[in-house]
Image (cartoon, rainbow, N blue to C red):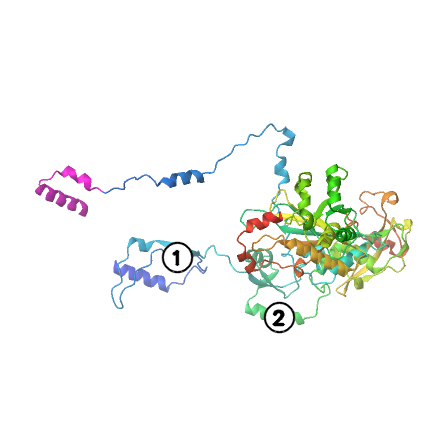
Amino acid sequence: MLALRSFLQSTVATAPSLCHQQTRNTFILKRKHPLPLHKKGGKPTKMRGRHFVYDLVEDTNIAKKPDIKVILNQFINGVGVKGDVLSLRPTQAYRDYLMPGLAVYASPENLVKYKSVENEPKAENSYSSPYVRRTLGRFSKLVLQITMNKLQPWTLEPWHISASFRKSGFIVPEYAIEMPPVQIKGPDLSLQDKEFLITVTINKTEKAKVRCRIHHWATGLDRLPWEEFHWKQPKEALIPDQAAELENMPLPQ
Amino acid sequence: MAGTLFRSMFTNTLSFYKCNSSNLRSLHTATVSYAARKGTRAKARAKKVKVEVTKVGFIPHNQRGKDKISKSNVSKHLDDTFKPLAKDDVYPLKYYSWIVYTAEDAVKAHQQTHHPTMYNVPDAFVIARVEMNMEAAKKNRFMDSFTRLSLLPHTFPRDEERTILAFCKGSELIKEAMDAGATTAGGTDLIKKIQDGQIKIGDYDYVVAHPNIITELVPIRGLMKRRFPNVRSGTLEPNLKDLVRKFSGGVQYRVLKDEHQENFGFVEVPIGRLNMEPKQVAENIEAFLKDLQSARPKRDGLFITRCLLLSPPSPEKLKIDPFVYVDKTLSKEVREDSDDEGDAVAATA
Protein backbone atom coordinates (compact mmCIF):
# COMPACT_ATOMS: atom_id res chain seq x y z
CA MET A 1 0.00 0.00 0.00
CA LEU A 2 2.71 2.38 1.08
CA ALA A 3 4.92 1.32 -1.78
CA LEU A 4 2.12 1.82 -4.26
CA ARG A 5 1.49 5.34 -3.00
CA SER A 6 5.15 6.31 -3.23
CA PHE A 7 5.27 4.86 -6.74
CA LEU A 8 2.23 6.82 -7.81
CA GLN A 9 3.61 10.01 -6.30
CA SER A 10 6.92 9.64 -8.05
CA THR A 11 5.29 9.03 -11.46
CA VAL A 12 2.90 11.95 -11.08
CA ALA A 13 5.71 14.28 -10.03
CA THR A 14 7.92 13.33 -12.98
CA ALA A 15 5.18 13.38 -15.66
CA PRO A 16 4.72 16.76 -17.38
CA SER A 17 1.65 18.64 -16.19
CA LEU A 18 -1.06 18.34 -18.81
CA CYS A 19 -3.16 21.26 -17.59
CA HIS A 20 -1.50 24.51 -18.54
CA GLN A 21 -4.51 26.53 -17.54
CA GLN A 22 -3.94 28.45 -14.36
CA THR A 23 -6.45 27.44 -11.72
CA ARG A 24 -8.47 30.38 -10.53
CA ASN A 25 -10.55 28.64 -7.92
CA THR A 26 -9.01 30.12 -4.80
CA PHE A 27 -11.33 30.78 -1.91
CA ILE A 28 -9.97 33.05 0.76
CA LEU A 29 -11.53 32.08 4.07
CA LYS A 30 -11.46 33.36 7.61
CA ARG A 31 -12.01 31.32 10.75
CA LYS A 32 -15.19 32.30 12.53
CA HIS A 33 -13.77 31.29 15.92
CA PRO A 34 -10.02 31.90 16.05
CA LEU A 35 -7.80 29.26 17.64
CA PRO A 36 -6.59 30.08 21.17
CA LEU A 37 -2.89 30.81 21.56
CA HIS A 38 -0.58 28.22 23.00
CA LYS A 39 2.64 28.58 24.97
CA LYS A 40 5.93 28.96 23.21
CA GLY A 41 7.21 25.50 22.38
CA GLY A 42 4.04 24.04 23.89
CA LYS A 43 1.46 21.80 22.32
CA PRO A 44 -1.11 23.52 20.13
CA THR A 45 -4.59 23.34 21.60
CA LYS A 46 -6.93 20.71 20.30
CA MET A 47 -9.08 21.91 17.46
CA ARG A 48 -12.82 21.74 18.02
CA GLY A 49 -15.63 21.52 15.59
CA ARG A 50 -16.23 25.26 15.75
CA HIS A 51 -12.70 25.86 14.53
CA PHE A 52 -13.67 24.47 11.17
CA VAL A 53 -16.41 27.03 10.59
CA TYR A 54 -15.31 29.66 8.10
CA ASP A 55 -16.45 32.93 6.63
CA LEU A 56 -15.88 33.51 2.91
CA VAL A 57 -13.68 36.55 2.42
CA GLU A 58 -13.12 36.36 -1.31
CA ASP A 59 -13.80 34.03 -4.17
CA THR A 60 -11.16 34.82 -6.78
CA ASN A 61 -13.17 32.96 -9.39
CA ILE A 62 -15.83 35.64 -9.48
CA ALA A 63 -13.61 38.65 -8.77
CA LYS A 64 -13.57 41.29 -11.51
CA LYS A 65 -10.60 40.81 -13.79
CA PRO A 66 -8.51 43.87 -14.61
CA ASP A 67 -8.52 45.50 -18.04
CA ILE A 68 -6.05 44.13 -20.54
CA LYS A 69 -3.92 46.06 -22.98
CA VAL A 70 -3.78 45.34 -26.69
CA ILE A 71 -1.91 46.94 -29.58
CA LEU A 72 -3.71 47.61 -32.85
CA ASN A 73 -1.99 46.21 -35.91
CA GLN A 74 -4.03 48.23 -38.40
CA PHE A 75 -6.16 51.35 -38.73
CA ILE A 76 -9.68 50.87 -37.32
CA ASN A 77 -12.30 53.47 -38.03
CA GLY A 78 -13.34 55.31 -34.89
CA VAL A 79 -10.91 53.37 -32.71
CA GLY A 80 -7.28 54.07 -33.50
CA VAL A 81 -4.34 53.79 -35.85
CA LYS A 82 -1.73 51.05 -36.14
CA GLY A 83 0.43 50.85 -33.02
CA ASP A 84 -2.12 52.39 -30.63
CA VAL A 85 -2.28 50.73 -27.23
CA LEU A 86 -5.86 50.23 -25.99
CA SER A 87 -6.96 49.26 -22.52
CA LEU A 88 -10.12 47.13 -22.74
CA ARG A 89 -12.28 44.73 -20.79
CA PRO A 90 -10.95 41.18 -21.36
CA THR A 91 -14.06 39.88 -23.14
CA GLN A 92 -14.30 42.87 -25.41
CA ALA A 93 -10.60 42.76 -26.21
CA TYR A 94 -10.69 39.06 -27.04
CA ARG A 95 -13.96 39.03 -28.99
CA ASP A 96 -13.60 42.29 -30.94
CA TYR A 97 -9.87 42.73 -31.40
CA LEU A 98 -7.76 39.63 -30.74
CA MET A 99 -10.00 37.02 -32.38
CA PRO A 100 -10.51 38.90 -35.68
CA GLY A 101 -6.77 39.61 -35.71
CA LEU A 102 -7.08 43.36 -35.45
CA ALA A 103 -4.80 43.59 -32.44
CA VAL A 104 -2.14 41.71 -30.48
CA TYR A 105 -1.46 41.44 -26.75
CA ALA A 106 0.66 44.27 -25.38
CA SER A 107 3.52 41.97 -24.35
CA PRO A 108 6.96 43.57 -23.91
CA GLU A 109 8.08 42.02 -27.23
CA ASN A 110 5.05 43.34 -29.08
CA LEU A 111 5.47 46.76 -27.53
CA VAL A 112 9.01 46.92 -28.89
CA LYS A 113 7.86 45.59 -32.26
CA TYR A 114 5.09 48.15 -32.70
CA LYS A 115 7.10 51.08 -31.37
CA SER A 116 8.90 51.39 -34.68
CA VAL A 117 5.54 51.75 -36.48
CA GLU A 118 5.30 55.39 -35.45
CA ASN A 119 8.34 56.30 -37.52
CA GLU A 120 7.14 54.48 -40.62
CA PRO A 121 5.94 56.52 -43.57
CA LYS A 122 2.17 56.76 -43.43
CA ALA A 123 0.02 54.87 -45.85
CA GLU A 124 -1.91 56.85 -48.42
CA ASN A 125 -5.34 56.15 -47.01
CA SER A 126 -4.46 57.13 -43.44
CA TYR A 127 -6.05 60.05 -41.64
CA SER A 128 -4.85 62.64 -39.18
CA SER A 129 -6.93 60.99 -36.44
CA PRO A 130 -8.92 57.74 -36.12
CA TYR A 131 -12.19 59.66 -35.97
CA VAL A 132 -11.82 61.59 -39.22
CA ARG A 133 -13.32 58.88 -41.43
CA ARG A 134 -16.40 58.77 -39.25
CA THR A 135 -16.74 62.55 -39.39
CA LEU A 136 -16.35 62.47 -43.19
CA GLY A 137 -19.10 59.84 -43.35
CA ARG A 138 -21.42 62.06 -41.34
CA PHE A 139 -20.69 65.06 -43.53
CA SER A 140 -21.39 63.13 -46.71
CA LYS A 141 -24.99 62.50 -45.59
CA LEU A 142 -25.59 65.93 -44.10
CA VAL A 143 -27.89 68.56 -45.54
CA LEU A 144 -27.04 71.67 -43.55
CA GLN A 145 -29.99 73.99 -43.12
CA ILE A 146 -28.90 77.60 -42.72
CA THR A 147 -31.70 79.63 -41.17
CA MET A 148 -31.49 83.23 -42.42
CA ASN A 149 -33.96 86.03 -41.89
CA LYS A 150 -36.65 86.61 -44.46
CA LEU A 151 -37.06 90.33 -43.77
CA GLN A 152 -33.66 91.70 -42.74
CA PRO A 153 -30.85 92.11 -45.32
CA TRP A 154 -27.83 89.83 -44.87
CA THR A 155 -24.69 88.51 -46.49
CA LEU A 156 -23.70 84.92 -45.75
CA GLU A 157 -20.60 84.81 -43.55
CA PRO A 158 -18.59 81.94 -42.00
CA TRP A 159 -20.04 82.55 -38.52
CA HIS A 160 -23.56 81.99 -39.87
CA ILE A 161 -22.46 78.58 -41.08
CA SER A 162 -20.59 77.80 -37.87
CA ALA A 163 -23.69 78.64 -35.79
CA SER A 164 -25.88 76.55 -38.11
CA PHE A 165 -23.50 73.61 -37.72
CA ARG A 166 -23.68 73.97 -33.95
CA LYS A 167 -27.48 74.00 -34.10
CA SER A 168 -27.48 70.75 -36.04
CA GLY A 169 -24.99 69.08 -33.68
CA PHE A 170 -21.62 69.58 -35.33
CA ILE A 171 -18.75 71.56 -33.91
CA VAL A 172 -17.03 73.43 -36.74
CA PRO A 173 -14.86 76.46 -35.95
CA GLU A 174 -14.96 79.43 -38.31
CA TYR A 175 -11.40 78.97 -39.56
CA ALA A 176 -12.27 75.49 -40.85
CA ILE A 177 -15.00 76.79 -43.17
CA GLU A 178 -14.27 77.70 -46.75
CA MET A 179 -17.07 79.73 -48.29
CA PRO A 180 -18.49 79.12 -51.78
CA PRO A 181 -16.82 81.13 -54.58
CA VAL A 182 -19.80 83.48 -54.98
CA GLN A 183 -21.06 85.84 -52.32
CA ILE A 184 -24.57 84.92 -51.21
CA LYS A 185 -26.84 87.79 -50.30
CA GLY A 186 -30.42 87.93 -49.12
CA PRO A 187 -33.20 87.88 -48.34
CA ASP A 188 -33.85 86.38 -51.73
CA LEU A 189 -36.63 83.80 -52.01
CA SER A 190 -35.11 82.41 -55.21
CA LEU A 191 -32.33 80.99 -52.93
CA GLN A 192 -34.87 79.00 -50.96
CA ASP A 193 -35.01 76.06 -53.38
CA LYS A 194 -31.30 75.97 -54.22
CA GLU A 195 -28.30 74.29 -52.69
CA PHE A 196 -24.56 74.87 -52.68
CA LEU A 197 -21.38 73.31 -51.36
CA ILE A 198 -18.96 74.57 -48.75
CA THR A 199 -15.63 73.02 -47.81
CA VAL A 200 -14.78 72.08 -44.24
CA THR A 201 -11.17 71.30 -43.29
CA ILE A 202 -10.81 68.77 -40.48
CA ASN A 203 -7.66 69.08 -38.36
CA LYS A 204 -6.33 71.44 -41.04
CA THR A 205 -5.65 68.44 -43.32
CA GLU A 206 -8.70 66.54 -44.57
CA LYS A 207 -11.23 68.42 -46.68
CA ALA A 208 -14.90 67.59 -46.85
CA LYS A 209 -17.67 69.04 -48.97
CA VAL A 210 -20.95 69.76 -47.20
CA ARG A 211 -24.29 70.36 -48.89
CA CYS A 212 -26.02 73.52 -47.63
CA ARG A 213 -29.49 74.97 -48.11
CA ILE A 214 -30.77 78.34 -47.01
CA HIS A 215 -34.11 78.62 -45.26
CA HIS A 216 -35.79 81.99 -44.97
CA TRP A 217 -37.13 82.34 -41.45
CA ALA A 218 -40.02 84.51 -40.38
CA THR A 219 -42.91 84.24 -37.97
CA GLY A 220 -46.61 84.91 -38.27
CA LEU A 221 -48.06 85.64 -41.70
CA ASP A 222 -44.64 85.90 -43.34
CA ARG A 223 -43.74 82.35 -42.41
CA LEU A 224 -42.98 80.06 -45.34
CA PRO A 225 -45.10 76.90 -45.52
CA TRP A 226 -43.62 73.66 -44.21
CA GLU A 227 -42.36 71.31 -46.85
CA GLU A 228 -42.50 67.66 -45.91
CA PHE A 229 -39.21 65.71 -46.05
CA HIS A 230 -37.49 68.68 -47.63
CA TRP A 231 -34.08 67.16 -46.87
CA LYS A 232 -34.88 64.19 -49.12
CA GLN A 233 -35.97 66.27 -52.11
CA PRO A 234 -33.35 67.01 -54.75
CA LYS A 235 -32.83 70.73 -55.31
CA GLU A 236 -31.25 72.87 -57.99
CA ALA A 237 -27.65 73.98 -57.66
CA LEU A 238 -27.09 77.63 -56.82
CA ILE A 239 -23.69 77.71 -58.46
CA PRO A 240 -23.65 76.01 -61.90
CA ASP A 241 -20.05 74.76 -61.42
CA GLN A 242 -21.11 72.67 -58.42
CA ALA A 243 -24.11 71.08 -60.17
CA ALA A 244 -22.28 67.93 -61.29
CA GLU A 245 -20.67 67.41 -57.90
CA LEU A 246 -23.96 67.88 -56.06
CA GLU A 247 -25.67 65.36 -58.29
CA ASN A 248 -23.08 62.73 -57.43
CA MET A 249 -23.48 63.23 -53.68
CA PRO A 250 -26.18 60.95 -52.26
CA LEU A 251 -29.11 62.53 -50.41
CA PRO A 252 -30.28 61.09 -47.08
CA GLN A 253 -32.97 58.48 -47.59
CA MET B 1 -22.45 5.16 25.11
CA ALA B 2 -20.81 7.08 27.87
CA GLY B 3 -24.17 8.71 28.59
CA THR B 4 -25.97 5.41 29.09
CA LEU B 5 -23.14 4.18 31.27
CA PHE B 6 -23.35 7.30 33.36
CA ARG B 7 -27.16 7.05 33.51
CA SER B 8 -27.05 3.42 34.71
CA MET B 9 -24.45 4.30 37.30
CA PHE B 10 -26.62 7.17 38.46
CA THR B 11 -29.76 5.00 38.78
CA ASN B 12 -27.73 2.45 40.66
CA THR B 13 -26.65 5.08 43.14
CA LEU B 14 -30.21 6.29 43.50
CA SER B 15 -31.58 2.78 44.04
CA PHE B 16 -28.84 2.33 46.58
CA TYR B 17 -30.28 5.23 48.47
CA LYS B 18 -33.78 3.72 47.99
CA CYS B 19 -35.18 6.51 45.94
CA ASN B 20 -37.71 6.13 43.19
CA SER B 21 -36.08 6.28 39.79
CA SER B 22 -39.13 8.08 38.35
CA ASN B 23 -38.00 11.13 40.31
CA LEU B 24 -35.30 11.51 37.68
CA ARG B 25 -37.70 13.50 35.59
CA SER B 26 -37.37 16.45 37.91
CA LEU B 27 -33.67 16.53 37.08
CA HIS B 28 -34.32 16.97 33.39
CA THR B 29 -33.45 20.54 32.47
CA ALA B 30 -35.30 21.44 29.28
CA THR B 31 -35.88 25.06 28.32
CA VAL B 32 -39.02 26.32 29.90
CA SER B 33 -41.19 28.35 27.59
CA TYR B 34 -41.54 31.55 29.55
CA ALA B 35 -43.95 34.12 28.23
CA ALA B 36 -42.29 36.84 26.23
CA ARG B 37 -41.78 40.11 28.02
CA LYS B 38 -44.76 42.37 28.20
CA GLY B 39 -43.63 44.88 25.63
CA THR B 40 -42.30 42.39 23.09
CA ARG B 41 -45.51 41.19 21.56
CA ALA B 42 -46.98 44.67 21.43
CA LYS B 43 -43.83 45.80 19.67
CA ALA B 44 -44.02 42.98 17.17
CA ARG B 45 -47.64 43.79 16.50
CA ALA B 46 -46.81 47.43 15.94
CA LYS B 47 -44.04 46.44 13.56
CA LYS B 48 -46.39 44.54 11.31
CA VAL B 49 -47.24 46.67 8.31
CA LYS B 50 -50.93 46.97 7.75
CA VAL B 51 -51.67 46.13 4.16
CA GLU B 52 -54.36 48.37 2.87
CA VAL B 53 -56.33 46.93 0.04
CA THR B 54 -57.54 49.72 -2.17
CA LYS B 55 -60.48 48.88 -4.30
CA VAL B 56 -59.91 49.69 -7.94
CA GLY B 57 -63.03 50.66 -9.76
CA PHE B 58 -63.86 49.65 -13.28
CA ILE B 59 -61.34 50.85 -15.84
CA PRO B 60 -62.36 50.77 -19.50
CA HIS B 61 -60.34 48.36 -21.62
CA ASN B 62 -58.70 51.05 -23.69
CA GLN B 63 -57.43 52.86 -20.58
CA ARG B 64 -55.88 49.91 -18.76
CA GLY B 65 -52.16 49.93 -18.13
CA LYS B 66 -51.80 53.58 -18.99
CA ASP B 67 -49.78 54.33 -15.89
CA LYS B 68 -47.35 51.61 -16.88
CA ILE B 69 -46.58 53.28 -20.18
CA SER B 70 -45.81 56.65 -18.68
CA LYS B 71 -43.44 55.04 -16.18
CA SER B 72 -40.04 54.75 -17.73
CA ASN B 73 -37.06 52.99 -16.26
CA VAL B 74 -34.61 55.41 -17.83
CA SER B 75 -33.28 57.86 -15.26
CA LYS B 76 -33.85 61.49 -16.12
CA HIS B 77 -30.50 62.41 -14.63
CA LEU B 78 -28.48 62.31 -17.82
CA ASP B 79 -24.87 61.38 -17.47
CA ASP B 80 -22.64 61.61 -20.52
CA THR B 81 -19.33 61.29 -18.71
CA PHE B 82 -18.83 57.85 -20.26
CA LYS B 83 -18.45 59.55 -23.64
CA PRO B 84 -14.96 60.70 -24.58
CA LEU B 85 -13.77 64.26 -25.04
CA ALA B 86 -13.14 65.32 -28.61
CA LYS B 87 -9.57 65.53 -29.84
CA ASP B 88 -10.25 66.82 -33.38
CA ASP B 89 -11.27 70.39 -34.14
CA VAL B 90 -14.23 69.40 -36.34
CA TYR B 91 -16.51 66.68 -35.03
CA PRO B 92 -20.12 65.55 -34.66
CA LEU B 93 -21.18 66.14 -31.06
CA LYS B 94 -23.20 62.91 -31.00
CA TYR B 95 -20.19 60.75 -30.16
CA TYR B 96 -18.74 62.99 -27.45
CA SER B 97 -19.75 64.39 -24.09
CA TRP B 98 -21.45 67.78 -24.13
CA ILE B 99 -19.35 70.90 -24.37
CA VAL B 100 -19.31 72.84 -21.11
CA TYR B 101 -19.44 76.55 -21.92
CA THR B 102 -18.81 79.44 -19.60
CA ALA B 103 -22.00 81.44 -19.01
CA GLU B 104 -20.61 84.35 -21.05
CA ASP B 105 -19.73 82.13 -24.03
CA ALA B 106 -23.14 80.47 -23.94
CA VAL B 107 -24.86 83.86 -24.06
CA LYS B 108 -22.60 84.92 -26.94
CA ALA B 109 -23.49 81.75 -28.84
CA HIS B 110 -27.18 82.48 -28.37
CA GLN B 111 -26.61 86.06 -29.48
CA GLN B 112 -25.23 84.67 -32.75
CA THR B 113 -28.32 82.65 -33.57
CA HIS B 114 -30.65 85.50 -32.56
CA HIS B 115 -28.74 88.05 -34.63
CA PRO B 116 -30.95 90.26 -36.90
CA THR B 117 -29.63 88.35 -39.93
CA MET B 118 -30.76 85.01 -38.50
CA TYR B 119 -33.71 84.76 -36.08
CA ASN B 120 -33.87 88.53 -35.54
CA VAL B 121 -34.87 88.30 -31.88
CA PRO B 122 -32.03 90.24 -30.24
CA ASP B 123 -33.99 90.71 -27.00
CA ALA B 124 -34.97 87.08 -26.47
CA PHE B 125 -35.04 85.67 -22.95
CA VAL B 126 -32.08 83.72 -21.64
CA ILE B 127 -33.64 80.86 -19.73
CA ALA B 128 -31.75 78.80 -17.20
CA ARG B 129 -32.80 75.21 -16.89
CA VAL B 130 -31.42 73.69 -13.73
CA GLU B 131 -31.86 70.04 -12.87
CA MET B 132 -31.72 68.85 -9.32
CA ASN B 133 -31.46 65.75 -7.23
CA MET B 134 -34.51 66.00 -4.96
CA GLU B 135 -33.39 63.48 -2.34
CA ALA B 136 -33.95 64.89 1.15
CA ALA B 137 -31.69 64.49 4.16
CA LYS B 138 -33.34 61.25 5.21
CA LYS B 139 -33.15 58.12 3.13
CA ASN B 140 -36.07 57.39 0.79
CA ARG B 141 -37.50 60.85 1.47
CA PHE B 142 -37.80 63.44 -1.25
CA MET B 143 -38.23 67.19 -1.29
CA ASP B 144 -41.53 68.58 -2.50
CA SER B 145 -41.93 71.03 -5.33
CA PHE B 146 -41.31 74.52 -4.01
CA THR B 147 -41.60 78.15 -5.07
CA ARG B 148 -39.09 80.85 -4.31
CA LEU B 149 -38.51 84.45 -5.15
CA SER B 150 -35.04 85.80 -5.71
CA LEU B 151 -33.78 89.24 -6.56
CA LEU B 152 -31.26 89.30 -9.38
CA PRO B 153 -28.59 92.00 -9.48
CA HIS B 154 -29.47 93.15 -13.02
CA THR B 155 -33.15 93.63 -13.67
CA PHE B 156 -34.57 93.17 -17.15
CA PRO B 157 -38.04 93.80 -18.59
CA ARG B 158 -40.40 90.90 -18.11
CA ASP B 159 -43.77 90.10 -19.59
CA GLU B 160 -45.62 89.85 -16.30
CA GLU B 161 -46.74 92.73 -14.10
CA ARG B 162 -46.82 92.35 -10.35
CA THR B 163 -49.04 94.26 -7.98
CA ILE B 164 -47.80 94.90 -4.46
CA LEU B 165 -49.73 96.24 -1.48
CA ALA B 166 -47.45 97.79 1.15
CA PHE B 167 -48.50 98.77 4.67
CA CYS B 168 -46.43 101.25 6.68
CA LYS B 169 -46.75 104.27 8.96
CA GLY B 170 -45.28 107.66 8.10
CA SER B 171 -45.41 109.60 4.86
CA GLU B 172 -41.69 109.13 4.28
CA LEU B 173 -41.94 105.35 4.39
CA ILE B 174 -44.99 105.41 2.11
CA LYS B 175 -43.08 107.50 -0.43
CA GLU B 176 -40.12 105.11 -0.25
CA ALA B 177 -42.34 102.11 -0.84
CA MET B 178 -44.05 103.78 -3.80
CA ASP B 179 -40.67 104.68 -5.32
CA ALA B 180 -39.45 101.13 -4.88
CA GLY B 181 -42.30 99.86 -7.01
CA ALA B 182 -45.32 99.20 -4.78
CA THR B 183 -48.66 99.52 -6.54
CA THR B 184 -50.40 100.86 -3.45
CA ALA B 185 -48.87 101.97 -0.18
CA GLY B 186 -50.54 103.42 2.87
CA GLY B 187 -51.20 103.32 6.60
CA THR B 188 -54.34 103.35 8.73
CA ASP B 189 -56.44 105.05 6.02
CA LEU B 190 -55.66 102.17 3.68
CA ILE B 191 -56.72 99.66 6.32
CA LYS B 192 -60.01 101.50 6.67
CA LYS B 193 -60.57 101.36 2.91
CA ILE B 194 -59.99 97.61 2.95
CA GLN B 195 -62.42 97.23 5.82
CA ASP B 196 -65.00 99.26 3.88
CA GLY B 197 -64.44 97.13 0.81
CA GLN B 198 -63.14 99.90 -1.46
CA ILE B 199 -59.90 98.02 -2.03
CA LYS B 200 -59.81 94.27 -2.44
CA ILE B 201 -56.81 92.31 -1.17
CA GLY B 202 -57.37 89.69 -3.84
CA ASP B 203 -56.38 92.20 -6.54
CA TYR B 204 -52.80 92.20 -5.30
CA ASP B 205 -50.16 89.54 -5.90
CA TYR B 206 -48.18 90.30 -2.76
CA VAL B 207 -48.90 91.97 0.58
CA VAL B 208 -45.95 93.34 2.55
CA ALA B 209 -45.74 95.39 5.72
CA HIS B 210 -43.41 97.36 7.98
CA PRO B 211 -43.35 96.15 11.64
CA ASN B 212 -44.54 99.55 12.93
CA ILE B 213 -48.07 98.98 11.61
CA ILE B 214 -48.53 95.32 12.43
CA THR B 215 -50.77 95.99 15.48
CA GLU B 216 -53.19 98.04 13.36
CA LEU B 217 -53.30 95.26 10.77
CA VAL B 218 -54.75 92.74 13.21
CA PRO B 219 -58.43 93.73 12.56
CA ILE B 220 -58.13 92.83 8.85
CA ARG B 221 -56.31 89.60 9.54
CA GLY B 222 -59.43 87.63 8.72
CA LEU B 223 -59.65 89.31 5.30
CA MET B 224 -56.03 88.53 4.43
CA LYS B 225 -56.06 85.01 5.78
CA ARG B 226 -52.78 83.30 4.84
CA ARG B 227 -51.35 86.38 3.19
CA PHE B 228 -51.06 88.24 6.47
CA PRO B 229 -47.50 89.61 6.55
CA ASN B 230 -45.14 87.59 8.71
CA VAL B 231 -41.42 87.22 9.13
CA ARG B 232 -41.31 83.59 8.19
CA SER B 233 -42.69 84.10 4.70
CA GLY B 234 -40.45 87.15 4.34
CA THR B 235 -43.22 89.71 3.94
CA LEU B 236 -42.59 91.63 7.18
CA GLU B 237 -39.35 93.58 7.47
CA PRO B 238 -38.13 96.93 8.79
CA ASN B 239 -36.33 97.58 5.49
CA LEU B 240 -39.48 98.08 3.44
CA LYS B 241 -37.69 99.61 0.46
CA ASP B 242 -35.61 96.53 -0.28
CA LEU B 243 -38.54 94.27 0.48
CA VAL B 244 -40.78 95.95 -2.09
CA ARG B 245 -37.95 95.98 -4.59
CA LYS B 246 -37.45 92.26 -4.12
CA PHE B 247 -41.11 91.52 -4.72
CA SER B 248 -41.45 93.86 -7.68
CA GLY B 249 -38.18 93.06 -9.46
CA GLY B 250 -37.33 89.55 -8.32
CA VAL B 251 -37.93 86.47 -10.41
CA GLN B 252 -40.29 83.86 -9.13
CA TYR B 253 -39.47 80.28 -9.90
CA ARG B 254 -41.04 76.96 -9.13
CA VAL B 255 -38.96 73.83 -8.75
CA LEU B 256 -41.02 70.93 -10.01
CA LYS B 257 -40.53 67.39 -8.84
CA ASP B 258 -40.99 64.77 -11.52
CA GLU B 259 -44.17 62.73 -11.24
CA HIS B 260 -42.62 59.35 -11.91
CA GLN B 261 -39.04 59.82 -10.80
CA GLU B 262 -39.08 61.32 -7.35
CA ASN B 263 -35.41 62.17 -7.17
CA PHE B 264 -35.56 64.37 -10.25
CA GLY B 265 -36.56 68.00 -10.10
CA PHE B 266 -36.04 70.86 -12.48
CA VAL B 267 -36.71 74.56 -12.85
CA GLU B 268 -36.85 76.79 -15.91
CA VAL B 269 -36.60 80.49 -15.23
CA PRO B 270 -35.72 83.55 -17.34
CA ILE B 271 -32.58 85.14 -15.93
CA GLY B 272 -31.88 87.82 -18.49
CA ARG B 273 -32.24 88.98 -22.05
CA LEU B 274 -29.85 88.56 -24.94
CA ASN B 275 -29.42 92.33 -25.38
CA MET B 276 -27.81 92.51 -21.93
CA GLU B 277 -24.05 92.27 -21.47
CA PRO B 278 -23.04 88.59 -21.21
CA LYS B 279 -21.28 89.42 -17.95
CA GLN B 280 -24.50 90.79 -16.44
CA VAL B 281 -26.35 87.61 -17.40
CA ALA B 282 -23.56 85.58 -15.79
CA GLU B 283 -23.95 87.60 -12.56
CA ASN B 284 -27.70 86.95 -12.64
CA ILE B 285 -27.05 83.22 -13.05
CA GLU B 286 -24.70 83.33 -10.10
CA ALA B 287 -27.28 85.06 -7.88
CA PHE B 288 -30.00 82.66 -9.01
CA LEU B 289 -27.92 79.53 -8.42
CA LYS B 290 -26.86 80.78 -4.98
CA ASP B 291 -30.49 81.38 -4.07
CA LEU B 292 -31.40 77.91 -5.30
CA GLN B 293 -28.51 76.41 -3.36
CA SER B 294 -29.89 77.89 -0.13
CA ALA B 295 -32.81 75.45 -0.45
CA ARG B 296 -30.37 72.55 -0.47
CA PRO B 297 -31.20 69.66 1.87
CA LYS B 298 -28.57 68.87 4.50
CA ARG B 299 -27.15 65.72 2.98
CA ASP B 300 -24.13 64.42 1.16
CA GLY B 301 -23.74 64.54 -2.60
CA LEU B 302 -24.96 66.73 -5.41
CA PHE B 303 -28.05 68.92 -5.27
CA ILE B 304 -27.77 70.83 -8.54
CA THR B 305 -26.85 68.23 -11.12
CA ARG B 306 -26.94 70.08 -14.42
CA CYS B 307 -27.42 73.59 -15.71
CA LEU B 308 -28.40 74.53 -19.27
CA LEU B 309 -28.97 77.87 -20.95
CA LEU B 310 -31.78 78.02 -23.48
CA SER B 311 -33.12 80.82 -25.57
CA PRO B 312 -36.23 80.20 -27.62
CA PRO B 313 -36.91 80.17 -30.57
CA SER B 314 -33.47 78.59 -31.02
CA PRO B 315 -33.52 74.86 -30.18
CA GLU B 316 -30.01 74.97 -28.77
CA LYS B 317 -29.32 73.93 -25.18
CA LEU B 318 -25.91 74.97 -24.00
CA LYS B 319 -24.49 73.38 -20.90
CA ILE B 320 -22.72 75.52 -18.34
CA ASP B 321 -20.87 74.52 -15.21
CA PRO B 322 -22.93 75.55 -12.15
CA PHE B 323 -20.11 74.68 -9.77
CA VAL B 324 -18.05 77.74 -10.57
CA TYR B 325 -20.76 79.68 -8.71
CA VAL B 326 -21.90 77.29 -5.98
CA ASP B 327 -20.33 74.49 -3.96
CA LYS B 328 -20.65 71.04 -5.39
CA THR B 329 -21.22 69.30 -2.07
CA LEU B 330 -22.23 70.44 1.38
CA SER B 331 -19.33 71.20 3.72
CA LYS B 332 -18.98 68.70 6.54
CA GLU B 333 -19.40 71.24 9.36
CA VAL B 334 -22.78 72.39 8.07
CA ARG B 335 -24.03 68.83 7.84
CA GLU B 336 -22.94 68.00 11.40
CA ASP B 337 -24.37 71.22 12.87
CA SER B 338 -27.88 70.58 11.76
CA ASP B 339 -29.97 68.43 14.04
CA ASP B 340 -33.32 69.49 12.70
CA GLU B 341 -32.75 68.67 9.06
CA GLY B 342 -36.35 67.82 8.42
CA ASP B 343 -37.50 71.24 9.64
CA ALA B 344 -35.12 73.07 7.36
CA VAL B 345 -36.51 71.26 4.36
CA ALA B 346 -40.07 71.84 5.48
CA ALA B 347 -39.43 75.56 5.86
CA THR B 348 -38.15 75.91 2.33
CA ALA B 349 -40.82 73.72 0.84
The amino acid type of the residue labelled 1 equals Leu
At mark 1, the secondary structure is strand
Q: Chain of mark 2?
A: A
Where does residue B329 sit, x and y in percent of width and height?
A: 59, 58
Relative to A121, A207 lies left or right: right
Q: Quadrant of residue B260?
A: top right
Q: Are marks 1 and 2 on the same chain?
A: yes
Q: Nearer the viewer, residue A154 or B203?
A: B203
Instruction: Tell me if mark 1 has few (under 14), some (14-19) or many (20+) residues whose alpha carbon lies within 10 angstroms of its own.
Output: few
Residue at 68 percent across and 52 percent down: it is: B237
Residue at 19 percent across and 46 percent down: it is: B3
Magenta span covers which residues? B1-28
**Residue A29 — which label?**
1
The amino acid type of the residue labelled 2 equals Lys
The quadrant in which the N terminus of chain A is found is bottom left
Relative to A93, A46 lies left or right: left
Where does residue A204 sit, x and y in percent of width and height?
A: 77, 66
**Residue B310 — which label?**
none
| The magenta stretch spans residue B285 | no
Residue B266 shows up from this direction: yes
Q: Nearer the viewer, residue B250 or A11?
A: B250
- Residue highlighted by disc 2: A115
Q: Is residue B266 above or below residue A38?
A: above
Magenta segment, principal secondary structure?
A: helix
Q: Quadrant of residue B194?
A: top right
Where does residue B51 sit, x and y in percent of width and height?
A: 49, 35
At mark 2, the secondary structure is helix
Q: Nearer the viewer, residue B223 or B331?
A: B223
Residue B202 shows up from this direction: no
Q: Chain of mark 1?
A: A
Where does residue A88 sit, x and y in percent of width and height?
A: 58, 59
| The magenta stretch spans residue B5 | yes
